[in-house]
Amino acid sequence: MQKINFHKNDNTEQKCEPDYITAHEYCMFNRRLLEHDKRCGCFHCLKVFDTKELEWVDFGLTALCPYCGIDAVIGESAGYPLTEEFLQKMRDYWFSY
């Protein structure tokens, strides 16, 4: 089942976005969250791995996937499933060229 998130924009209108879109906010400047996680997943290469394997950019604040080198990593504490199906939905949306 897909989670839908409701957000209010500046005009106080509500808009809803699927969870594979809202989860993207957790892939940037995410060190604080990932430091407390054991597992994370990359929605570019679809690997799920231990956070000890992470590499860092943006002055050490954004995680890079150790397998593909892309900043497309979300951790378990973000509250989204680290399943291949969910990561694939994110990849399809964010990397559909």
Image: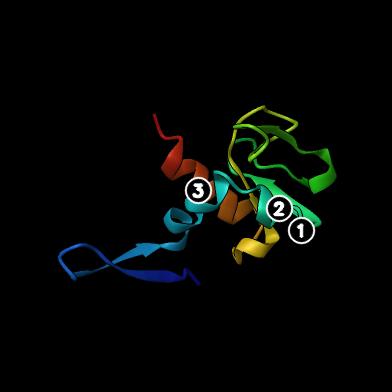
The answer to whether residue 39 is visible is yes
- Kind of residue at badge 2: Leu
Residue 12: quarter of image: bottom left
Circle 1/circle 2 CB separation < 8 Å = yes
Is label 2 in a helix, a strand or a loop? helix
Question: Which residue is drawn at the image coordinates 57% and 44% (left, top)?
Answer: 29
Residue 7 in the image, given as x and y percentages of width and height:
32, 68
Question: Which residue is drawn at the image coordinates 47% and 56% (left, top)?
Answer: 20
- Kind of residue at badge 1: Asp
The answer to whether residue 50 is visible is no
- Kind of residue at badge 3: Met
Mark carried by residue 90: 3
* Mark 3 to mark 1 CA distance (whole Å): 20 Å
Q: Quadrant of the C terminus?
A: top left
Q: Nearer the viewer, residue 92 or 37?
A: 37
User: How would you rate the neighbour count of disc 3 (Cα within 10 Å): few for under 14, some for 14-19, many for 20 or more?
Assistant: many
Mark 2, residue position = 34
Is label 3 in a helix, a strand or a loop? helix
Q: Nearer the viewer, residue 20 or 27?
A: 27
Residue 71: quarter of image: top right
Mark 1, residue position = 37
* Mark 2 to mark 3 CA distance (whole Å): 18 Å
Residue 50 in the image, given as x and y percentages of width and height:
82, 48
